[in-house]
């Protein structure tokens, strides 16, 4: 008895068409131009594809379809909570557009963006989101020469060259600084990341110091200015040095990661927060409200930025035009919690 030879390989478009009872052309059109296929027919095709386990070969169909279905996101780090909510929201919103995220991190080394962008371009990525405005010219030129949509996220400037979706970081830092001044603090330490190639940290530090000068008519002492990387352990050890001898009455931290390290230093040294020292952060990351006491900070709308970034990049890739509006400022929110109080008399 002869046995029917089984089909080898994964299911293809022919199998989907046979299962759905439609033509191969209709299946192809449903994936490439779904708006041209009636909804009941699309639904039959989607069910057939799901039952068969069919996976669309976007790169092969790219000969007739200019979309690869992937969107790149380049972030400085995925090592802590700074960008976690934004990344999650960005990926989730892309799924609503039937797109997939390709993510890469350069570890705050902008020179690595050249290799990352080249890799994304080799995969014919539909668009790329970059964090901030500090970037080398080469990767930006590579994207521009190939007409790949690119946006800057997380930071906002009214005169940015790139389309941007982000928060006013200077305003966020000014809010927490003015809060401390209004409580009566004048001896305030500022602990911020290195600002040389980090426009978000630079904007925050500039905003904090400008707010202090405007409110008190004097700036901070040089001995109250400290550099600190995005590292809880380093922040803890630095804060333990700051809190020895002649400590300030309050500390402004450039983000909630640094603030967490400062809180740990206070616990280790028996300093009461906020009775002995007030602490503020910037970001309102997951867990900041659950610190003991809860951290007074400014909420950066990370999820909103991620959603808007995904929508904007997909729209740019489809229209071939810059977004409208070109620049979007997403409002920050002051979060008053238990880590601040007036200085002791």
Image: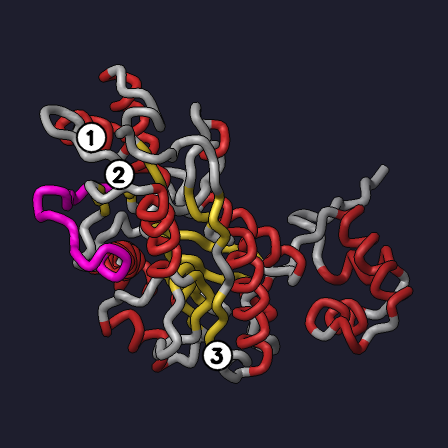
- 225 in magenta: yes
Q: CA distance from mark 2 to mark 3?
A: 36 Å
The residue that appears at 70% across and 57% down in the rendered structure is 12
Q: Residues within 10 Å of mark 2 (few under 14, many from 20)?
A: many
- How far across and how far down the image is residue 87, in percent? 49, 50
Quadrant housing the N terminus: top right
| Residue bearing the label numbered 1 | 239
SS category of the residue bearing label 2:
strand
SS category of the residue bearing label 3:
loop
Q: Quadrant of residue 288?
A: top left
Image marks 1 and 2: residues in contact by CB distance under 8 Å: yes
Residue with the most extreme bottom position? 321
Q: Reading the chain from its start, which is encountered first: label 1 or label 2?
A: 1
- How far across and how far down the image is residue 286, in percent? 49, 36
The nearer-to-camera label among 1 and 2 is: 2
| Residue bearing the label numbered 3 | 326
- Eyeballing the image, is 304 above or below 247? below
- Which label is found at residue 272? none
| Residue bearing the label numbered 2 | 251
Tell which of 44 and 213 is nearer to you.
213
Q: How is the image coloured?
A: secondary structure
């Amino acid at each position: 008895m002869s046995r029917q030879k089984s089909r080898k390989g994964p299911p293809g478009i022919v199998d989907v068409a046979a299962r759905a009872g439609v033509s191969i052309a209709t299946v192809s059109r449903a994936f490439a131009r779904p708006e041209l296929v009636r909804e009941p027919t699309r639904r039959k095709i989607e069910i057939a594809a799901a039952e068969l386990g069919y996976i669309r070969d976007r790169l092969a169909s790219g000969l007739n379809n200019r979309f690869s279905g992937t969107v790149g996101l380049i972030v400085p780090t995925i090592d802590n909570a700074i960008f976690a909510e934004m990344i999650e929201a960005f990926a989730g919103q892309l799924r609503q557009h039937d797109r997939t995220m390709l993510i890469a991190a350069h570890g705050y080394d902008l020179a690595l963006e050249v290799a990352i962008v080249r890799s994304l371009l080799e995969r014919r990525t539909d668009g790329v989101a970059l964090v901030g405005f500090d970037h080398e010219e080469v990767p930006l030129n590579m994207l521009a020469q190939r007409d790949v949509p690119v946006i800057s996220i997380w930071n906002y400037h009214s005169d940015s060259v790139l389309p941007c979706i982000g928060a006013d970081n200077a305003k966020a830092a000014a809010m927490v600084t003015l809060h401390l001044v209004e409580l009566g603090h004048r001896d305030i330490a500022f602990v911020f990341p290195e600002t040389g190639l980090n426009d978000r940290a630079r904007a925050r530090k500039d905003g904090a110091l400008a707010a202090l000068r405007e409110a008190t008519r004097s700036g901070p002492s040089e001995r109250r200015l400290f550099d600190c990387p995005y590292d809880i352990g380093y922040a803890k050890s630095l804060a333990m040095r700051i809190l020895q001898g002649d400590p300030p009455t309050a500390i402004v931290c450039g983000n909630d990661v640094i603030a967490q390290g400062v809180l740990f230093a206070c616990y280790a040294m028996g300093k009461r927060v906020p009775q002995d020292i007030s602490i503020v952060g910037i970001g309102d990351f997951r867990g900041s409200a659950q610190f003991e006491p809860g951290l007074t900070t400014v909420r950066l709308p990370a999820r909103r930025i991620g959603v808007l970034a995904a929508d904007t990049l997909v729209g740019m890739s489809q229209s071939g035009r810059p977004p409208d509006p070109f620049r979007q400022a997403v409002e920050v929110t002051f979060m008053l919690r238990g880590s601040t109080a007036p200085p002791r008399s």
